[in-house]
Image: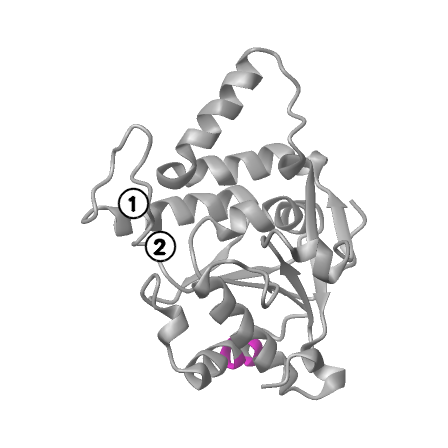
Amino acid sequence: MNLQPQRHILIVYPHPDDEAFSVAGTIAYYTKKMNTPVTYACLTLGEMGRNLGNPPFATRESLPEIRRKELVAAAEAMGIQDLRMLGLRDKTIEFEDDEKMVKLVEGLIEELMPSLIFTFLPGFAVHPDHEATARAVVEAVRRMPTAARPQILGCAFANDTIEKNGEPHIQLDISEMKMDKLKALQAHASQTGWMMQETEKRIDNGEPMSESWLNVEKFYIINPDQYVK
């Protein structure tokens, strides 16, 4: 890992488990190796998640509380001490007033003064809630004086991401923190159980943990001036 020191890191994602797939290894390194303060603002509890465990152990009624507990466990696995659950409703972020969402992010930035923000790459985040979250973060930073802006790093999942944007600007070898990322993913058992079961079988069979998503995390540097409303 070759990470730049940061004053404070802010993570803004809409769903529990977004962070585990996207930034868990990087964040674990910052918190556990560099003692960097990290705040995770999770907009919803992912109560509309399609999975109910494998085999199912949740119901539509119990899923919100289950996912809340999973989120807490994942944050602990990454060493995050400041977890904010902002209480918006899953699969409705795209319908929230844009200005309301921007103000929400502005409030977090004003309070925390982060030097680095992790979110999604606008236009390449696949899920409508992801896209709405990314737009709000980028617009909040765009309104700031240039010299005061934190850097924004965005994750992307669209199939045409590299074709249209080139290779991610930052590709971090997180193999040193592989087990931390795995624990964060395991914490979200209701959503990741099937995937973790397959991974654990391979580990039990003595197969090397060579999956790229456990070894590398990739980010695009976002220039907010490219996203003028």
Q: Which residue is mark 1?
A: 66
Relative depth, front residue between 121 and 115: 121
Residue numbers of the magenta segment: 106-110
Q: What residue is shown at x 51% (from left), y 54% (from top)?
A: 81
Check disc 1 and give the amino acid type. Ile
What quarter of the picture does the C terminus occupy? bottom right
Is residue 42 visible to us here? no
Question: Helix, strand or loop at disc 1?
Answer: helix
| In the image: residue 226, left or right of residue 11 | right
Q: Residue at x 57, y 18 (%)?
A: 203
Answer yes or no: do the residues labelled 2 and 1 have beta carbons within 8 Å?
no
Residue 113 visible in the snapshot: yes
Q: Position of residue 159 (x, y in %)?
A: 61, 51
Identify the residue position indicated by label 2 in the image: 46
- Counting residues from the start of the chain, the first of labels 2 and 1 encountered is 2
What percent of the width, then of the height, locates residue 34?
71, 51
On the image, the x and y values in percent for residue 161 come to: 66, 56
What's the mark number on residue 41? none
Residue 228 lies, with reference to residue 131, above or below; the image says below
- Observer-side mark, 2 or 1, equals 2
Task: Count all numbered tags in the image, as a single digit.
Answer: 2
Element under disc 2 = loop
Which quarter of the picture shows residue 227?
bottom right
